[in-house]
Amino acid sequence: MMPPTSAATPRYILMHDNDNVAIVVNDGGLPAGAVFADGLTLLEAVPQGHKVALRDVAKGEAVIRYNVTIGFAADDLPAGSWLNEQNVRMPDARELVNLPISTRLQPPAEPLEGYTFQGFRNPDGSVGTRNILAITTTVQCVSGVVEFAVKRIKEELLPKYPNVDDVVGLEHTYGCGVAIDAPGAMIPIRTLRNITLNPNFGGQAMVVSLGCEKLQPTRLFPKGSIPIQNGGGAEPSLVCLQDAQHVGFMSMIASIMKQAEANLVNLNKRQRETVPASELVVGVQCGGSDAFSGVTANPAVGFATDLLVRAGATVMFSETTEVRDGIDQLTSRAATPEVADAMIREMAWYDNYLQRGGVDRSANTTPGNKKGGLSNIVEKAMGSIVKSGSSAISGVLSPGEKLTQKGLIYAATPASDFICGTLQLAAGMNVHIFTTGRGTPYGLAEVPVIKVATRNDLANRWHDLMDINAGRIASGEATIADVGWEMFQLVLDVASGRETWAEKWKLHNALVLFNPAPVT
């Protein structure tokens, strides 16, 4: 561990000995003329997290960070210069051919045994970390009605069932006015189906339908799509608002509340029990990223990812555009050639999807990313990919698919925080880890979200929003391993019922279904 240093002492972080740039550590950045311990002098003011040239970089020369070419100098950049999106030209994307396949597989790490949490065992064998009544909607038209009903259920019914944590409406903007038979339509449909079957919802499916929508309940839940429970086939509990029995708005609300109470009775019988850590399904994601994301929070997540995999758990990493530039790093860690081929296939599909929209992967980076020191998507990707740790990648999921295996899984999703979280929910996530550098109050009603700050400044300012401060790694107060173990233990505690800040404040982002098919 590096000893803590004075905040006034100019400091930079170098990721690899071959790098020709480093990032400024100091809160608030450094002024022109600041001198580092090695004698490097800043030629201009450099904000915190932004890159400084460690030596002269000639026009057209590679800019190297993480021992990877993240771009090329657009001008001659003397040592001490500030490098940013204005003077770093992005390289072309790596072609999806001649990639290394399963060349960096490490020997299996020693299993972590004896770790447990208190979870809710479901009839299908999965385990929930929360006990939630979820009400699925087939179409956006019924969202207002469901929202009204959920408010009444929380106020009037939920207090009678203390073992039930919450009631959520799975509302969305899909279901009608869409090309329901188009090839891409399978993605939002199976996403909504599989979210309904998330482990945190107790194996029960309650659906509110309008009646005339394209996404009919029988299409959303074909016969056999809900796991068999107690020796019989399970069917969703359905309330259709256009049924003749409903006379007036309050009649609809009464029907929803009646069915909800029947489901609450069943959910209330559930009790937490001791289950092995192997029942965890953890989704990892980053949003509002900065240059520290790949230095502190994401490496700590990667360390925790390896611990979870060693404990037999499942961890999903995602965000296609944020790993695309590290595809060679991923295929080299694929457990089998078939896993590598599946990753390549998902990357190619997404390349084509972006091309149809007239953009490429560079559209990913936000103004906040750039203000936080990330010059382009290549640099951002190198910091994002480390959330996956070092374990072999054992499987690949297409958008909206449900997990069928354990280990480290690449779940292909867009990088949008809300769509990625929605798709990881569909895959079966029961705990979410979300890192941020710029800061975001992101949260989900359906699953606990552990928020990780990349910088001390953010963690201190947002002290009641961030669950873990990984900025201590940059300031020398903790190591990546220290924070990784802290995160691993917090995952177990949160899975057992400990409340996260996002849960305390009820910060719940809306679900966003990924729909690449036409809207009619």
Image (cartoon, rainbow, N blue to C red):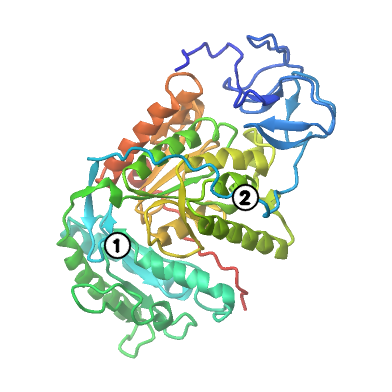
Rendering coords of residue 378 (x, y %): 66, 42
Residue 324 numbered mark, or none: 2
Q: Position of residue 464 (x, y in %)?
A: 39, 35
Quadrant of image for the N terminus:
top left
Residue 316 drawn above or below residue 173 = above
- The image quarter in which residue 75 lies: top right
Q: Nearer the viewer, mark 1 or mark 2?
A: 2
Q: Of the residues shown, which amino acid type is indicated by label 2?
A: Arg
> Which residue occupies 34% across, 74% down?
207
Q: Secondary structure at mark 1?
A: helix
Q: Considering depth in this image, is 80 or 409 the residue closer to the camera?
A: 409
> Residue 90 — which label?
none
Q: Is residue 484 left or right of residue 77?
A: left
Quadrant holding the C terminus: bottom right
Q: Sort mark 1 into few (<14), some (14-19) or many (20+) by Cα contacts within 10 Å.
A: many
Q: Measure the C-alpha gap from mark 1 to mark 2.
A: 33 Å
Q: Position of residue 265 (x, y in %)?
A: 17, 67
Label 2: how many Cα within 10 Å (few below 14, some 14–19, many 20+): many
User: What residue sits 42% from the left and 81% below the top?
Assistant: 210
Residue 510 seen anywhere in this rendered image of the structure: no
CB under 8 Å between discs 1 and 2: no
Whether residue 65 is situated above or below residue 175 in the rendered picture: above
Residue type for callout 1: Phe
- In the figure, residue 235 lies in which quadrant? bottom left
Evaluate whether residue 84 shows in this view.
Answer: yes
| Residue that numbered label 1 is attached to | 201
Position above or below: 7 against 86: above
